[in-house]
Image (spheres, helix red, strand yellow):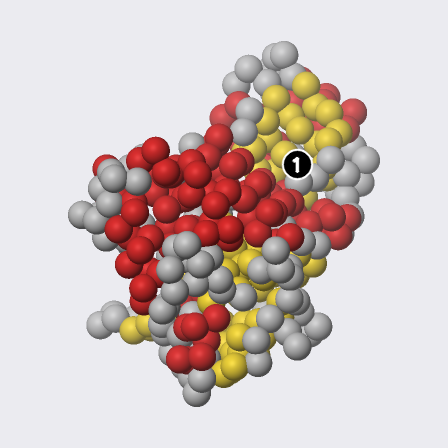
Amino acid sequence: MKAVELKNIIKTYSTKKETITAVDDVSFSVEEGEIFGLIGPDGAGKTSIFRILTTLLLADKGNAKVLGNDVVKEWKTIRDIIGYMPGRFSLYQDLTVEENLDFFATIFNTTVQENYDLVADIYKQLEPFKTRRAGKLSGGMKQKLALSCALIHKPKILFLDEPTTGVDPVSRKEFWEMLKRLKKQGITILVSTPYMDEAKLCDRIALIQKGKILSINTPVEIVKQFGQNLYAAHSENMFKLLNDLRAFPKTKSCFAFGENHHLTLDGENIEELKNYLAERGHKQLTIREIKPEIEDCFMQLMKAHPNPSQREGL
């Protein structure tokens, strides 16, 4: 049995001026025991998909199942077997850490003591602050409390919607270490994130943009499919360099990427490119070949599919 199955899901939102398609004919499945990442920028449709799967939102078309249960017909069963951590902190800010955890345990007719072994690893970091109100916690501590509350009833599947957004790098690293330990306990985890560097921490990922899936595979296989030489370019005038690189006739793609510009070329024309840039007065110019990352693959797929269509076999 698949942990999660979506088939041709469509979700639109209407305003007075327009109708926006947030999820556009999306189909994919998740295996039990997998960490599956839904990777894309804000507005890509990640939250709408998660809200459909957690029975909080009805799709306009298509169907979805969670552990074989239909999200419309068997929504009560699904709510008992999943844990959901929304993108925005949604616990009771006036309750203490301890009171929030007890409250969520009570909702599911269990106790903190009964399932303490599942959250112990996380809760030990919160215990010194157990009498502090949730609203007074730091971002990282709020994240740990929300995860503890989502786990306290021992769910079979965990849905985490952008759990590390706005959290410091150390807390992000700790959070992903927690997820790896939860996976070892047999919990299936679906996580959405706009951070491309987190994609490689998942077993499989779906790259999504404007409500459509661009690619689904393991992070390693997606990088393998890049299929071109990739170069990083740097000079003392990065703005002028970007414009000149894009104006070079044999440039296929060029994007600003941290301290460098990443580019691909039509054929091996590095020396020709260097001469072209030298003629335009670029100083301290460096161009080197590099290995592509998930973000490079995402940009390549966006360029190849400006109006991406759902492909067979995803």
Instruction: Determine if residue 259 is in view.
Output: yes
Single out the residue that lies furthest toward the bottom.
Answer: 73
Please tell me whether residue 88 is drawn above or below residue 65 in the rendered image.
Answer: above
Please rate how many residues cluster around mark 1, counting C-alpha atoms within 10 Å: few if below 14, some from 14 to 19, many from 20. Answer: many
Which residue is the extreme one toward the left? 94
Amino acid bearing label 1: Leu
Query: Mark 1 — residue?
Result: 263
Q: Which one is nearer the viewer's eye here, 269 or 72?
A: 72
- On screen, residue 167 versus residue 276, left or right, reads left
Dot 1 falls on a residue whose secondary structure is strand
Placement of the N terminus among the 4 image quadrants: bottom right
**Image point 81% across, 35% down: which residue?**
268
Q: Is residue 308 visible?
A: no
Residue closest to the eye, 184 or 205: 184
Q: Residue at x 30, y 47 (%)?
A: 98
On screen, residue 43 above or below 60: above
Residue 74, image quadrant: bottom left
Q: Tell me what residue is drawn at x 66 percent, y 29 percent.
A: 232
Residue at 61% x, 38% y is: 254
- Please state the horizontal and vertical placement of residue 138, each as a whole percent of the image: 32, 35
Looking at the image, residue 16 lies above or below residue 146: below
Figure quadrant of residue 293:
top right
Which residue reaches farthest right? 268
Camera-side residue: 155 or 37?
A: 155
Seen as rendered, the residue at the extreme top is 284
Figure quadrant of the C terminus: bottom right
Establish if 294 lies above or below 171: below
Expressed as whole percent of the image width and height from the top left, the position of residue 59 reads 42, 78
